[in-house]
Image (cartoon, rainbow, N blue to C red):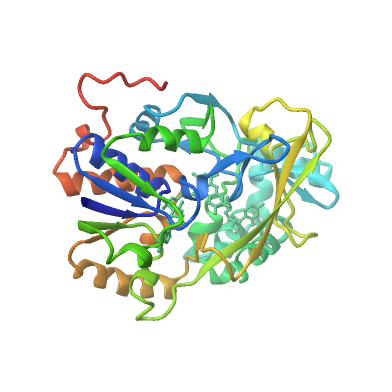
Amino acid sequence: MAFDYLIVGAGFAGSVLAERLARIDGQRVLLIDKRPHIAGNAYDHHDEAGVLVHRYGPHIFHTNAREVFDYLGQFTEWRPYQHRVKASVDGQLLPIPINLDTVNGLYGLSLTAQEVEGFFNAAAEPCERVRTSEDVIVSRVGRELYEKFFRNYTRKQWGMDPSELDAQVTARVPVRTNRDDRYFTDTYQAMPRRGYTRMFERMLDHPNIKVMLNTSFADIRDEVAYDAVIYTGPIDEYFDYCYGKLPYRSLQFVFETFDLPQVQPVAVINYPNDQAYTRITEFKHLTGQVHHKSTVVYEFPQAEGDPYYPVPRPENATLYQRYKALAETTPGVHFVGRLGTYRYYNMDQVTAQALTLFSTLTGRSRRERAAAPVGEVTSAR
Ligand code: FAD
Ligand code: UDP
């Protein structure tokens, strides 16, 4: 059988494109993944105890893009969820992002919002040009809070000092002078009610989409007929590392199930300083599942292993630009997604990027690109 598209990778990037091309454009799509499951890094499943867990670490959906939220809402109901994280620092569990309560709790103070702004200003080290992940934090809250909450966490997570990483990495975490302890402030914050994998199953349930798991691009590229490739794996791998390897950071996930309904007070506790792992996540806070047992995951950063994080720093951006230029002169293949475009993107950003590629490929307008086909019921089943 001949396909219009061979899509490599069944994560957000590949699955959104498969769904759009098949359902809206009538294209025949072969979607492959080398893993034994769909949903990419967002994959979730019930573990041996029956607890719904995220195999590749905690995935919390949040976006300001109504288009993305509504688009995915065609395939899932949503469960409202506001994410909260504590950091274990100096023997206390304190809110992160740093806010008024973090400072008051850490130093035994009772500052007001206005006073804490003065506190930050007094401690901050002005910086002419905020360039690195160290600059972002030190120029806002000073060196002491930087060292307690950011320096060691970042060194563990990335295997390098914050001064060697682009500002965008630690800039993901804001600093607040009020008592808002939510991790995100996006307009839409929710979890797919029956999990990510279920949402992906709905997306891919179409007669024009054939899914092949346990299949790598190398296995199939010369075995089937197709007109074009959409590639969501690492771009450097596609080109056989011809300019050298793009660095990615990996993680080891260690799961532990407790014979307790609840293990920790919030979904995620960060351990910046004292442990080899960066954070512990208890899934039931995220999923809302009711169960007499509970499973947590510890994240141990490592250099080798599955590529989870592109590493944002200038020399890597330069190397990526060379691969991107090569991609632009290679006909018949389109790169998209966190690995395909070497960007530290969240799920919603990857979804938006995939919708944009869909409009580019099909000439559909921005207004049309995320909508359900005319006449179809759009509410999630
Ligand atoms: P992926 O999900 O990585 O999918 C790519 C797929 O391609 C993979 O399944 C891979 O097996 C397959 N593949 C690669 N190469 C080949 C090949 N040669 N042949 C066949 N298949 C191949 N985002 C959020 O919005 N909120 C969060 O809370 C959040 N938490 C995260 C926590 C962790 C620990 C990590 C690692 C990421 C997190 N993210 C989060 C980011 C989120 O995982 C990504 O934005 C999203 O999954 C990217 O989708 P993708 O399709 O680009 O890539
Ligand atoms: N970070 C930190 N301390 C924290 C939380 C985050 O130093 O308590 C830094 C760290 O470098 C991390 C980055 O901020 O990689 C972005 O944090 P985020 O929670 O967005 O990371 P992700 O969920 O993508 O792993």
Residue 266 drawn at (x, y percent): 72, 36
Occupied quadrant, residue 302 = bottom right
Instruction: Tell me if residue 295 can be seen.
Output: yes
The residue that appears at 25% across and 73% down in the rendered structure is 326
Relative vertical location of residue 100 with respect to residue 346 in this rendering, above or below: above
| Left or right of residue 335, residue 56 in this image | right
Occupied quadrant, residue 267 = top right
Instruction: Tell me if residue 180 can be seen.
Output: no
The residue that appears at 51% across and 45% down in the rendered structure is 42
| Left or right of residue 191, residue 29 in this image | left
| Left or right of residue 78, residue 31 in this image | left
Relative vertical location of residue 77 with respect to residue 315 in this rendering, above or below: above
Observer-nearest residue: 315 or 175?
Answer: 315
| Left or right of residue 39, residue 235 in this image | left
The residue that appears at 26% across and 21% down in the rendered structure is 376
Residue 119 drawn at (x, y percent): 69, 48
